[in-house]
Image (tube, rainbow, N blue to C red):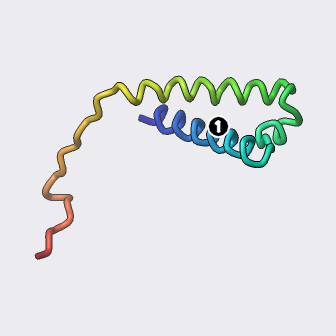
């Protein structure tokens, strides 16, 4: 699902930003938006937070096991 991929991407961006804050004391999102108090930064933080909440649902979903079609699967070589 495309929404899952977008949420995962945003959550990874947020995690990398928090890593930069923790290691280098450098907030990439605040730098891009102008400051952490700027409205654009607050919007970005909110979107990333919502993406993190969405990703919680990924932990509790049952994932489909896709059946491999033998006509499209690569041939086994022995």
Q: In this view, which residue lies farthest toward the left?
A: 78
Q: Position of residue 27 (x, y in %)?
A: 79, 40
- Near-viewer residue (22 or 29): 22
Q: Position of residue 20 (x, y in %)?
A: 72, 46
Q: Position of residue 1 (x, y in %)?
A: 41, 35
Q: In this view, which residue lies farthest toward the bottom?
A: 78
Q: Position of residue 60 (x, y in %)?
A: 35, 25
Q: Is residue 3 positioned above or below 32 on the image?
A: above
Q: In this view, which residue lies farthest toward the front?
A: 23
Q: Is residue 35 positioned above or below 68 on the image?
A: above
Pointer 1: residues within 10 angstroms few (<14), some, or many (20+)? many
Q: Which residue is mark 1?
A: 14
Image-based side of 8 in relation to 64, left or right:
right
- Near-viewer residue (24 or 63): 24
- The quadrant the C terminus occupies is bottom left
- Res 30 → quadrant: top right
Point 19% across, 60% down: residue: 73
């Amino acid at each position: 699902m495309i929404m899952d991929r977008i949420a995962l991407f945003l959550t990874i961006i947020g995690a990398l930003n928090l890593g930069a804050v923790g290691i280098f004391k450098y907030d990439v999102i605040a730098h891009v938006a102008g400051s952490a108090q700027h409205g654009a930064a607050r919007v970005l933080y909110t979107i990333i937070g919502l993406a993190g909440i969405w990703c919680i649902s990924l932990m509790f979903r049952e994932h489909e096991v896709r059946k491999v079609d033998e006509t499209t699967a690569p041939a086994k070589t022995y």
